[in-house]
Image: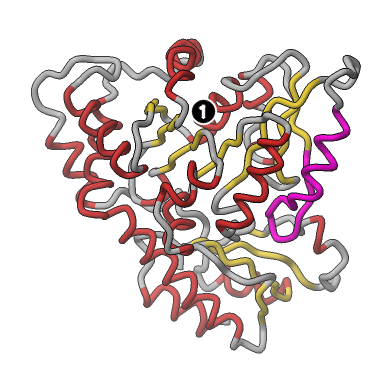
C-alpha cells in the first residue's frame, strides 16, 4: 500500500527497455544525436507546432530555468501560495535568477485566482523602482493539491499575464495526469490558452529521469542554450533522456499511464468517501488524494503497512480540522494496483 509519491514508482518496462536498447553503440553528445532530434520532432507533433526542447534532469531545473529565461532586474514572478516552485524547491528559482522573488497568490484548492493575480501584479507598478518589476506568472498543472485548472481558468490567468506583458509558464510535473483529466490535447491545454513555456515532466509518470523544458517562442531558444549549460543541466549523454521520452511518447503510452494512475486515485477517493473513518479534503482531479483522518486512524493504517505523508493544511482550510485530525496525502502511479487500493480502503 505505497501511496507516498509517484516518485517512488520505478520505470515502466517499455521505458526501461528503451534505455537498454540505446545503451549500445555510439551517438553524438550534448543533445545532437539522431534520437534527440527524433524526440524533439515528436514533441512538436504532440504540441501541434514547432517547439524548442531542452532536456534536463529534474523538474526543479526545468522550472528554475524557465523563470531564469524571463528574469528582469528586481524581478517578481507570481505563483500560487502552495506552488511547488515556492514551497518545495529550496529557493532554486531565486538562485537560478540571481535574486528574483516569488510572490504568492491565493486561491482555493491550489489554484491561483485570476482576480487576485491581477491585484498582486498591480502592487508592482513599473515606475516604482523600489518595489521591483513583474517578470512572469507560473502555474502548476496538476496543482500541488491534486486539482486541475480548467481550460477556461488557464485562459483567464493567461489574459491577466498578457495584459501586463508577462510570459506564462506551466509547471507540468504531472502534465499527463492533468491532460487526461481534462480530456484535452496538449495544444489546447497550453499555447492555445496563452501558455508560453512548459516544464514537461515524465519522471512521475513512468520514466526513470526525464524532464524537458518546452518553449513555444522559438526566438527564446538561443538564450536558453546558455542558461542550461551554465546551470550544469546540459547532459553529454542526453540520448538516455531521449530514450525515455521516445518510449514514453510512443503509441500514447504516456497518456495510458496517466489514465491508469488517475483511475486508481478515483477508486481510492470513492472508497475513502464511503468510509466512516475518513473524508476527502476536497474533490480529486488527478492522481493525488488528500484525506482527513483521525490521527490515531492514520497511525494504525501505517502500522498495517500503508505508506503516505502527513500534509500541511492549506491556508484556505486553516482551522477546519479538529485537534485530533490530520490531513494526509496519498498519491497513485502507473504502478499502483487495484489490490493496493482495495486493501487500503478495507483497512480504513
Query: Nearest the camera: 189 or 202?
Result: 189
> Is 125 left or right of 13, judged from the image as shown?
right
Q: Is residue 116 magenta?
A: yes
As drawn, 333 above or below 140: below
Query: Nearest the camera: 145 or 118?
Result: 118
> Is 316 left or right of 220, judged from the image as shown?
right
Q: Secondary structure at mark 1?
A: helix
Q: Is residue 122 magenta?
A: yes
State the residue position of label 1. 61
Image coordinates for residue 10, horizontal then vertical, percent: 34, 50
Name the residue rendered at 39%, 51% in the picture.
205
Name the residue rendered at 37%, 42% in the picture.
47
How is the rendered protein coloured?
Answer: secondary structure
Image quarter of the N terminus:
bottom left
Q: Residue furthest front?
A: 163
> Is 75 left or right of 272, judged from the image as shown?
right
As drawn, 309 above or below 344: above
Image quadrant where residue 122 sits: top right
Name the residue rendered at 42%, 53% in the picture.
176
Q: Residues within 10 Å of mark 1 (few under 14, many from 20)?
A: many
As drawn, 127 above or below 239: above
Image coordinates for residue 297, horizontal then vertical, percent: 67, 76
Please tell me how many numbered marks the rendered image carries. 1
> Is 256 left or right of 138, judged from the image as shown?
left
Name the residue rendered at 71%, 47% in the picture.
82
What residue span does the magenta drawing correspond to? 104-124
Image quarter of the C terminus:
bottom right
Image quadrant where residue 303 sits: bottom right
As drawn, 107 above or below 225: below
Image coordinates for residue 60, horizontal then vertical, percent: 54, 33
Query: Nearest the camera: 237 or 213?
Result: 213
Amino acid at each position: 500500500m505505497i501511496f507516498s509519491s509517484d516518485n517512488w514508482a520505478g520505470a515502466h518496462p517499455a521505458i526501461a527497455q528503451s534505455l537498454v536498447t540505446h545503451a549500445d553503440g555510439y551517438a553524438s553528445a550534448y543533445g545532437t544525436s539522431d534520437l534527440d532530434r527524433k524526440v524533439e520532432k515528436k514533441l512538436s507533433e504532440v504540441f501541434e507546432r514547432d517547439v524548442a526542447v531542452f532536456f534536463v534532469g529534474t523538474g526543479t531545473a526545468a522550472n528554475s530555468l524557465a523563470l531564469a529565461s524571463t528574469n528582469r532586474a528586481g524581478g517578481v514572478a507570481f505563483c500560487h501560495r502552495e506552488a511547488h516552485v515556492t514551497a518545495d524547491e529550496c529557493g532554486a528559482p531565486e538562485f537560478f535568477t540571481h535574486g528574483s522573488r516569488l510572490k504568492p497568490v491565493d486561491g482555493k484548492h491550489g489554484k491561483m485566482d485570476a482576480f487576485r493575480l491581477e491585484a498582486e501584479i498591480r502592487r508592482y507598478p513599473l515606475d516604482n523602482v523600489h518595489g521591483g518589476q513583474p517578470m512572469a506568472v507560473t502555474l502548476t498543472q496538476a496543482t500541488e493539491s491534486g486539482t486541475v485548472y480548467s481550460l477556461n481558468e488557464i485562459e483567464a490567468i493567461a489574459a491577466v499575464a498578457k495584459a501586463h506583458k508577462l510570459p506564462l509558464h506551466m509547471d507540468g510535473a504531472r502534465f499527463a495526469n492533468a491532460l487526461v483529466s481534462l480530456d484535452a490535447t496538449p495544444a489546447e491545454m497550453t499555447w492555445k490558452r496563452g501558455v508560453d513555456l512548459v516544464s514537461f515532466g515524465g519522471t512521475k509518470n513512468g520514466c526513470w529521469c526525464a524532464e524537458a523544458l518546452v518553449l513555444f517562442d522559438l526566438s527564446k531558444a538561443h538564450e536558453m542554450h546558455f542558461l542550461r549549460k551554465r546551470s550544469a543541466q546540459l547532459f553529454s549523454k542526453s540520448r538516455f533522456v531521449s530514450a525515455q521520452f521516445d518510449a514514453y511518447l510512443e503509441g500514447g503510452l504516456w497518456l495510458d499511464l496517466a489514465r491508469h494512475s488517475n483511475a486508481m486515485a478515483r477508486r481510492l477517493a470513492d472508497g475513502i468517501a464511503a468510509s466512516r473513518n475518513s473524508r476527502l479534503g476536497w474533490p480529486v482531479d488527478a492522481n493525488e488524494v488528500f484525506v482527513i483522518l483521525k490521527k490515531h486512524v492514520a497511525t494504525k493504517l501505517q502500522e498495517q503497512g500503508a505508506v503516505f505523508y502527513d500534509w500541511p493544511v492549506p491556508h484556505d482550510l486553516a482551522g477546519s480540522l479538529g485537534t485530533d485530525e490530520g490531513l494526509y496525502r496519498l498519491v497513485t502511479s502507473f504502478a499502483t494496483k487495484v489490490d493496493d487500493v482495495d486493501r487500503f480502503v478495507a483497512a480504513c
